[in-house]
Amino acid sequence: MRKNWDKIIHETYELLFKASEPSVDFNDLLANATINDEGRKDIGFMNYEIDEDVMRNIIVEQAKKYKMSHYECRAFSVSMYLGASPKTKYRELIDKQYDENSLKNK
């Protein structure tokens, strides 16, 4: 059975933006998008953030739901991280920054 990648990607963006801070409807972003100089829709995806664990879980659940092979899952994951998804809040970077700030204050 052939996968409808456009549908899967769109559905995943819906889930990612719903789980982002602030939460937003992806379809509303698309409907209200402006057109940039290159003729592409600009949805302002960098105005939203999502925790790395939440994003990873959404991607994994989508991979399971659509029975992706290992190769498909890797390609799908890269597409989600490098595409128009919300900014990812990486816990390691947050923890590292906290540790560095703690050391500076002593």
Image (cartoon, helix red, strand yellow):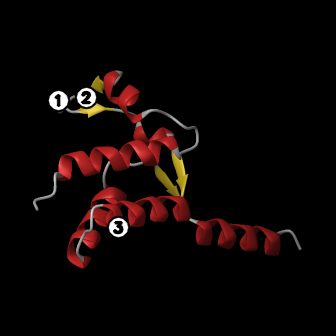
How busy is the neighbourhood of tag 3: few (under 14 within 10 Å), some, or many (20 plus)? few
Q: Which residue is mark 3?
A: 64
Position of residue 29 measured from the top left corner of the image (x, y, whole percent):
39, 29
User: Dot 1 corresponds to which residue?
Assistant: 39
Q: Earlier in the sequence, mark 2 or mark 3?
A: 2
Camera-side residue of 4 and 46: 4
As displayed, is residue 83 above or below residue 64?
Answer: above
Picture residue at 80% right of the left edge, 75% below the top: 103
Q: Residue at x 27, y 68 (%)?
A: 67
Furthest toward the front, the residue is 1
**SS for dot 3:** helix
Q: Is residue 16 above or below residue 44?
A: below
> Dividing the picture into quarters, in which one does residue 43 lie?
top left
Toward the left, the furthest residue is: 2
Which mark lies nearer to you, 2 or 3? 3
Q: Nearer the viewer, mark 3 or mark 1?
A: 3
Whole-percent x and y of residue 18?
Answer: 50, 41
Q: Which mark is residue 36?
A: 2
Q: CA distance from mark 2 to mark 3?
A: 35 Å
Amino acid at circle 2: Asn
Camera-side residue of 61 and 101: 61
Left or right of 81, for residue 7: left
Q: Residue furthest bottom?
A: 70
User: Is 14 situated left or right of 18 in this image?
Assistant: left
Residue 100 vs 36, above or below: the answer is: below
